[in-house]
Amino acid sequence: MIIESLIGKSLINISSQRIKIHRILQQLAKLIVQHESPEPGKRSRIWNYEDFRHIMETNTGTNRIRIIVLSNDEEHPHRTTLNIEGLSKLRRLKILILHNVKFSGNLDDLSNNLRYLSWHKYPLNYLPSKFKPKWLVKLIMPDSSITQLWRDEEKYIPLLRSLDLRGSKDMKKIPDFRRLPRLERLDLEGCTSLVQLHPSIASLPNIKFLNLRNCTNLVSIPNELFGKRSLEFLNLAGCSKFAQSLRFKGVTLSWSYVRLMWL
């Protein structure tokens, strides 16, 4: 009833599965959050870069912070490189969105309460080993420095539905998909160091979207994947080595067999 009422008053609009909030409502929400505390580190939501910089530089973040959204379309050359270690303290964080924010240092941990993690140009080779993302639904890390998700033991992520590692050119190893049992979308476009997919991807019951465009060194995909009924979109454009291996084996694929983008 509340949603319908807000739509009727033109305060929110739902389009393409996204909710757009009227600017007046956004401004009101920000005023409410700012009145929670004069200290940014004691507020529930952070969206201002200077507030975030202050928290990182002074290490004053607290468990009151639930959401951080710093999403900028362009890089700001005058912004400083921040110490990444302050993120480890935010134990109740549920949503983290970082775009064009520069970091240095080591990250020991992330909040196990994270539901949504979107980090453009994630600067490290692995996710923190202490991070246990049991509530994580979306993991979005385009153009990252990731080589594989975990340095040592792979983690079980029971609720993860979408994994996006587009443009992560150093990504060499994809995890065992049995540890991501609810995965529906996997985007690996431009992961040029990736050689093969773990065979367990064919066992995913709900996989719908698989983008492997321009994975130029990919040579192996489980054969069972091509006959998977749940798969609605498969993009292999630019996978030149995989195409060569198919031709060498005399294998051809038809549109009736799999919903495939090849050109």
Image (cartoon, rainbow, N blue to C red):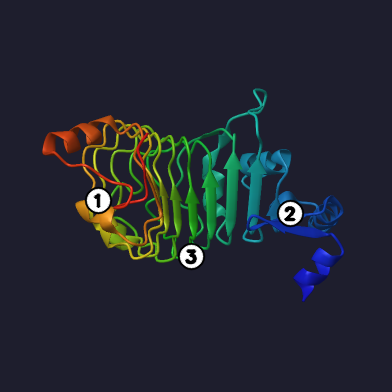
Residue beneath disc 1: 198
Q: Position of 161 compared to 202: left or right?
A: right
Q: Residue furthest bottom?
A: 1
Of the two numbered discs 3 and 1 in the rendering, the one whose residue sits closer to the viewer: 1
How far apart are the alpha carbons under marks 3 and 1?
23 Å
Residue beneath disc 3: 135
Mark 2 or 1, nearer chain start: 2
| Location of the C terminus (image quadrant) | top left
Q: Nearer the viewer, residue 89 or 247?
A: 247
Q: Residues within 10 Å of mark 1 (few under 14, many from 20)?
A: some
Q: Position of 81 compared to 233: left or right?
A: right
Mark 3 or 1, nearer chain start: 3
Residue lying at 66% horizontally and 61% vertically, measured from the top left: 64
* Amino acid under disc 1: His
Residue beneath disc 2: 20
Pointers 3 and 1 in contact (C-beta within 8 Å): no
Q: Nearer the viewer, residue 209 or 178?
A: 209
* Amino acid under disc 2: Lys
How far apart are the alpha carbons under marks 2 and 3?
25 Å
Q: Quadrant of residue 145?
A: top left
Q: Position of residue 37 (x, y in %)?
A: 79, 57
Residue lying at 40% horizontally and 64% vertically, measured from the top left: 182
Q: Residues within 10 Å of mark 3 (few under 14, many from 20)?
A: some
Q: Position of residue 222 (x, y in %)?
A: 22, 51
Question: Which numbered circle lies on residue 248?
Answer: none
* Amino acid under disc 3: Trp
Residue lying at 62% horizontally and 42% vertically, measured from the top left: 56
Q: Nearer the viewer, residue 84 or 8?
A: 8
